[in-house]
Amino acid sequence: VACVVAYTNYYADAIPWEAFAFTGTSTERNRLTSIKLPTTVAVISDRAFKSCADLTYISIPNSVKTIGESAFSLCTSLPEIILPDSILKIGAFAFHSCIKVKTITIPPLVTSIGEGAFIDCKGLTSIYAQPDVPVNLANYTIVFASVDVLNCVLNVPFGQKALYAAAPQWK
């Protein structure tokens, strides 16, 4: 049985740690398929939706500023990630193994992307980096590991190609 959740009357400012994460045995599954978060949420905490293998849609409101570590890790059915312009921080391994995602847009205000944030997103064909200055990834080696760089196009703001070409992990 599929599960659709809409938190329209939920007034907390954060989705807690492992709130919807699948933590059962290998014979059980979290059946969450769709979720719409309320506009009161500013933080999606670590592991909030980790291993929600049936999740195919999530609506993230413009109020969200932080996506925690492994927040959507192993959401293997999620076909797209639409991040609002309000996002400032994407945690480590936030979208690890979201294998069906084809396109990701890094919003213009993002200042921090954690290690392995998009590791094993093997379906990625387009990355739209909107910050005028590339997010500093010099301390990390696997932010985009296993993304097929020959078939994934990095789109950057007009006039910023040289900056991104010189930046570690954005080349």
Image: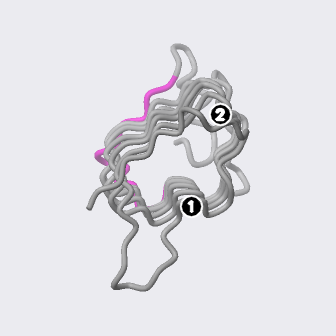
Whether residue 145 sits left or right of residue 62 in the image: it is left
Magenta: main secondary structure? loop
Q: Which region is colored magenta?
A: 142-156
**Quarter containing the N terminus:** bottom left
Q: Decide if residue 115 is in sight here.
A: no
Q: Position of residue 65 (x, y in %)?
A: 69, 34
Which amino acid lies under the numbered mark 1 shown in the image of this protein?
Ile
Query: Could you tell me which secondary element the residue under label 2 belongs to?
Result: loop
Q: Is 150 colored magenta in this rendering?
A: yes
Q: Is residue 98 left or right of residue 96?
A: left
Q: CA distance from mark 2 to mark 1?
A: 25 Å
Q: Residues within 10 Å of mark 1 (few under 14, many from 20)?
A: some
Residue that badge 1 annotates: 142
Q: Nearer the viewer, residue 151 or 18?
A: 18
Q: Residue at x 64, y 21 (%)?
A: 132
Q: Position of residue 30 (x, y in %)?
A: 40, 67
Magenta stretch contains residue 66 = no
Residue for badge 2: 64
| Nearer mark to the viewer, of 2 and 1 | 2
Give the number of the disc on residue 134: none
**Number of on-image labels:** 2
